[in-house]
Structures are given as structure tokens and as C-alpha cells.
Image: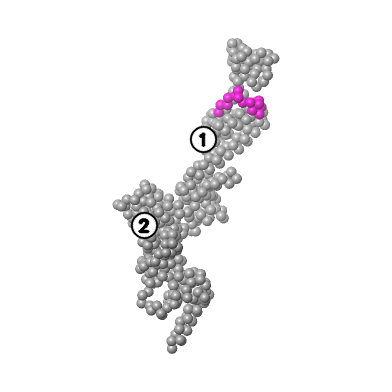
Amino acid sequence: MNSQKLIESFKELKELKNINRPTMMKVLEEVFRTIIRKKFGTDENCDVIVNTDKGDLEIWRTREIVEVGAVEDSHLQLDTKEAKSLQVELELDDDDIEVGEEIYERIFINDFGRRAVLAARQTLKSKIVEIEKDELYKHYKDRVGEIINGEVYQVWKRELLVLDDEGNELSLPKHEMIKRDFYKKGDTIKAIIKEVELRNNNPIIRLSRTDNNFLAKLLELEVPEIFDGLITIKRIARTPGERAKVAVESYDDRIDPVGACVGMKGSRIHGIVRELNNENIDIIPFTENTSLFIQRCLTPAKINSMRLNEEDRKASVYLDPDEVSKAIGKGGLNIKLASKLANYQIDVYRDVDDVDEFDDIELQEFADEIDQWVIDALVNIGCDTARSVLNLKPEEVVRRADLEEETVNDLFKILTEEFDEEGGNGE
């Protein structure tokens, strides 16, 4: 293997790994200087010239001419006799061959021996791989929080292997994917760069489609006012692929933050909804007024009144019976997201004025017969009294409170017997 072929092989590797020219030249020079030191003991009198574009490398050695018999180090010196033998090869004049003068001679790669050349090639490969890993880590470490488009290369049980535009491998774990996400090899995918870490000196770039920042960045791309800083995203609460609530605030009184985010006829928000597999997105105007903000968080439900416990960050919300289901939402999702967005524990209660308080019983009074977690589940769907539970069908309580059928049947039995006993005592 001659020097030109050796350097050409690393020129190709440089292009494949996308390592910049100065770095490549520095690595090549460092490796060959190591070879020179191993062979001659020092590289101080040698120049290594690398041209990665031409695939060429030259090593030039400087030696001082001394009298015959006065050579102390053949790598640094040569006598006049040896210098004259190199006169033709080096195209030297007679005046150049004098004691004290220096001559410059080229050392060829093959002069180091085949084993040294092979070792150099292996060392170069190792160093280039290390540099590539380091460059990849630095490149993506600075891009955490950015959206990236990639191509699905492999679909595994626990993750997707995604390639970026330069062929670098990125990981999208299954738990960072929306439940209804389905990708196959060759598909284009959009995600956010969530984290970058080094594991055993290997850069691991993890992507996410469930992170709140993914939704924030999608909004930033679709809404120029957010990108320009006229509107800011204050908070996000999200169940990926199902529903999200986003609180926004405008720094310009002339700009409606909700209207700007939604766009004309939903033009801006629809693209994001499609990207997130039809995730319903509620855009809510932010306010420092806690009561008003909680009221907005519970959209589309309309509340009648509210009691706040700021110390424990709890809110008791009272609604008309037909508004309770709207506040709770399908599977309790609306109130769950509202609580996250407001950073308050929100409990909803049915606001019924035409029921005699003596004709009903607070569920909490059944704490000795009904487990507290069951009572809490019922309260969370707006059923805080016995009659508010009995006014529902058992199957509806099972569905809305996410309780077992057997548990609900026992519950109805306890509550019904209580009123039967009261009716009996009144006769």
C-alpha cells in the first residue's frame, strides 16, 4: 500500500463521516508523527504536509551535514560522504554540501514498512470514528428542543431507528410515540430532539413526539406571532394523541392570542392536529386571575361558582348537573388536563338548589362503609351526595368513575338501603 492509496482511502472516509478538512488534516499529521517518533525517536526535524483533497501526503526531514565520523544521531545528522551520495537525488549543488548546512529529504510511507503502514491505517480509522462520535454529540447537544425530520430506517419492538439527512442514527423509543403512531421503514417522521447523552463513549440521541415541547415547537412553526415573540406559550397540559390544553398570552393588546393560534377557519391548528394524530387542542387565554383561569381551563363547561384553597392549591367547582359531564370530559380527561394546566386539584360538584338538604346525604358520611378511594372517584365526577349517585345508572357510574361493576353494585346497595331505612323510620 503506497502513501497515495492510503491517504485516498481516508479521503473517502472523511467524506462519508462528514469530518471537516482541518480536523482530518490534524488527525493525519498526528498519526504520522507518531510513526516517525517510533522509528526515529523524535519528529522535531520533520514536516508532515497533508493534502486531503488530492489524497496526498508528504514527509520532509531536515538533517545537518557534519564531518565524516562526527555523526551522533543519524536521524538529525549526516556526514559529507552521505550527503554527496544524495546530491543527484536531491538535486543539490556542491555549495550545498558543506559542514553546517542543512539538507531536506523526503521520507516515503513505504520506508516505514508494511506493518507500520497498516497500523497507521487502523489508528486513523479509530481516531476518525472517535472524532465523528464527538462531533455528533456536540452537534445534537446544542440542538436539544429542536424539531427534526428523519427517515424511519428500522422498526423494532421498543424503538424506531431514525436516520437524519446525514445518515446519523437517532432513537425514537416507543414510549415517546403517540399511541396511534404507526410507521414503517422509509416513512418520513417528525419529532423533537429530547435528550442527548454519551453511553460508553457512544452518542445516544433520543427523539420524542409526546413531549410538551414538541407541541410547543409545532405551534411556533405554524404561528408566526409565537415565533416572533408577540405571543408566548405559558403552559401546556397534554395526553398525547388524545387531548391538549395550551395557555397562551399576547404581549400586544391588538393581537388575539387564541385567534392567532387557531388561524382563519382553523387553518393553523388543523395542521398540528393532523401531525398529532387528531389530538384535540384547546387554546386558552392565560390570566393571573386564578379563578378565571380555572374557569377557562374547564372549557367547554360553564361553572356557577368556585371555592379556592390557595394554600393547598385546591379548587371546588360547582356546576349545573348537565355541565358536570362536560367539565369531567371523556374518561375524566378534561378535568385531568385542567388540573395540570392550572396546577390546582379541581373537584367538581353538582349545584342543585331545588333539593332539600335533609333529603340527601353527603357521601363522606358513608366513609365507614365505602372505601375513601371510591368516594374520591365519585366526587371527581361530580357525585358528592348519595342521591347524585343514585340518579345515575350503575353502568354510567362504572364508565365515568372507572370503577369495577362489582364495586358499583355494592355501592348502590349501601346507598339504597340507607334511604329504605329512612323511609321505614318515617312511616
Question: Foreground residue, 422 or 266?
Answer: 422
Image height check: is 365 above or below 101? below
* Quadrant of the rendered image containing residue 391: bottom left
Relative to 223, 379 lies left or right: right
Residue situated furthest top in the rendering: 94
Q: Amino acid at mark 2?
A: Thr
Relative to 292, 100 lies left or right: right
Question: Foreground residue, 89 or 215?
Answer: 215
x 47%, y 50%: residue: 192
Q: Is residue 376 visible?
A: yes
Residue situated furthest left in the rendering: 254
The magenta segment is 37-50
Q: Amino acid at mark 1?
A: Asn
Residue that mark 1 sits on: 20
Residue situated furthest bottom in the rendering: 427
**Residue 128 x, y percent position in the rendering:** 57, 37
In the rendered structure, does residue 228 fall within the stretch colored magenta?
no
Residue that mark 2 sits on: 287
Measure the alpha-carbon separation of dots 2 and 1: 50 Å
In the rendered structure, does residue 48 fall within the stretch colored magenta?
yes
For the C terminus, the image quarter is bottom left
Secondary structure at numbered mark 1: loop
